[in-house]
Image (tube, grey):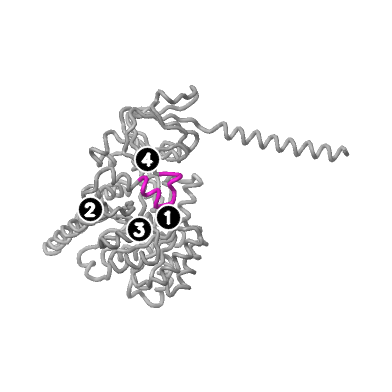
Amino acid sequence: MSRLRRHTTLLVLLIVALASTTQLGAQSAAQITLVKAGRLLDPRTGNVLAPAAVLIEGDKIKQVDAPSQIHVSAAAKTIDLGNTTLLPGLIDSHTHLFLDIVIPPEEELKRHENPIFAPGLLLALAESPIKRAFIGAQKAREDLESGITTVRNLGHSGVDGDTELRDAINAGRITGPRILAAGRKLIARGGYLQNLNAALADSILAQEFLFIDGADRARAAVRQNVFQNVDVIKVTVDNVTVPELAAAVEQAHLEHLKIAVHAIDTTSIQTAIDAGADSIEHGNEATDAQLKQMREKGIFLDLTPTFYDGILKIAEPTIVMSPAYRARRVASDARRKHTYDDLVQRVLKSGVKFSAGSDMCWFYPGKTCGQASVATLLNLRQAGMPALDVIRAITVNAAEMLGWQDRIGAIEPGKFADLVAVAGDPLADITELERVRFVMKGGQVVRNQLSSH
């Protein structure tokens, strides 16, 4: 062997050795953390482990057991949360991080179609995309600080807002929850904003939506979102036919993506069922027969109790209302609450798979986005859902709906170390989840208001 070849071989071997040493060093440097608490709630079974300890290696859970059964070296970091209750990180499976809509004044409401939502959406579209990006980043951080460690952002984020925010969080450039991004929402023309300036309408709408005009356009819209590297496809089916939606579903499934369908009335819900949607968002007017069909087909119902407490709760601090308008709102809110109570009971009896999302896109005076989102999700308890089922809806059930049941939704070995802790017992008082004292995402402490060492 020539001297040059021998030297080259030695150099290659040295590089390989150095690379292996670096890799082994990186692997051995994974932080070992032991989190101890008074109790640990397993939402899947409802069982409580007391006392409890979670051994974390890097960003994953390695062992869950009684503290006496877990042995770690002196170099391990220990976080003692005292007599608290540990739960999996919460999942908001339906949110809109790039909207912060203020309910308009009464006179402004009279001047628009879709008056509560559309004016705020139009204002958001008129904003700088960079400004919207900062709003999205702020709301993402607020969600995480309130214990929401994963969100599914279902549209209304511009062309690439949620995919870029997801990537920035994953790269560690900013702080926020895990994000499943939907990109632009697929709709039929005229579903959200009507009577826009005809010369500008297409360019305005293209910032937020992709249009379904026939089966071929439906497939093309899915492909356009795939080009943006989305995690899920969101469709609103008002005025969309079953063949059009079925084409979008087929294309999404070819791309190994789930498809979430906004459907509130019975006609839209049936369209979603017939087309084979993976989840139906809202589903407020679902009949018992439709719930049975959804159960048989394995379609998730993603409940969104956004206005269970009424629009007045959001609007009162910011707008002046006439006595007549207030009276109409009070009556409408009471009817909505009664209808939702009935829906929740029928869902529980039907056996349909269900999760929950906040549909958060609203400005709540005095609350961060995360605080408002958690409070909204807990409206299900007020609607008559048992506390354990509410917790399941925003942990294990949501993880399954997202297709991430192998990563999140439970405190189990192999899953991401996404943990929250509350001072009391959330099964006895679910509002404890509005007072999260400790948040960990992927083994990293985000918030800790409890003693530790």
Given the image, on which type of amino acid does mark 2 rest? Gln
Return the residue nearer the eye: 129 or 339: 339
Q: Quadrant of residue 387?
A: top left
Quarter that holds the C terminus: top left
- The residue identified by callout 4 is 88
Q: Which residue is mark 3?
A: 296
Q: Mark 1 sits on what residue?
A: 133
Query: How far is disc 3 from disc 4 in space, using C-alphas?
Result: 29 Å
Discs 3/4, front: 3
Q: CA distance from mark 3 to mark 2?
A: 18 Å
Q: Residues within 10 Å of mark 4 (few under 14, many from 20)?
A: many
Give percent across and percent down for residue 104: 25, 62
Q: Pointers 2 and 1 in contact (CB under 8 A)?
A: no
| Type of amino acid at the residue the image marks with label 3 | Glu
The answer to which of 91 and 97 lies nearer the viewer is: 91
Instruction: Give the residue type that dot 1 points to.
Output: Ala
Is there any visible trace of residue 115 in the rendered image? yes
Magenta stretch: residue 397 in it? yes
Give the farthest residue toward the front.
296
Viewer-side label of 1, 3:
3
Location of mark 2 (residue): 345
Ranked by sequence position, the earlier of labels 2 and 1 is 1
Question: For the residue labelled by badge 3, is the local secondary structure a helix, a strand or a loop?
Answer: helix
Q: Earlier in the sequence, mark 4 or mark 1?
A: 4
* Residue numbers of the magenta segment: 395-408
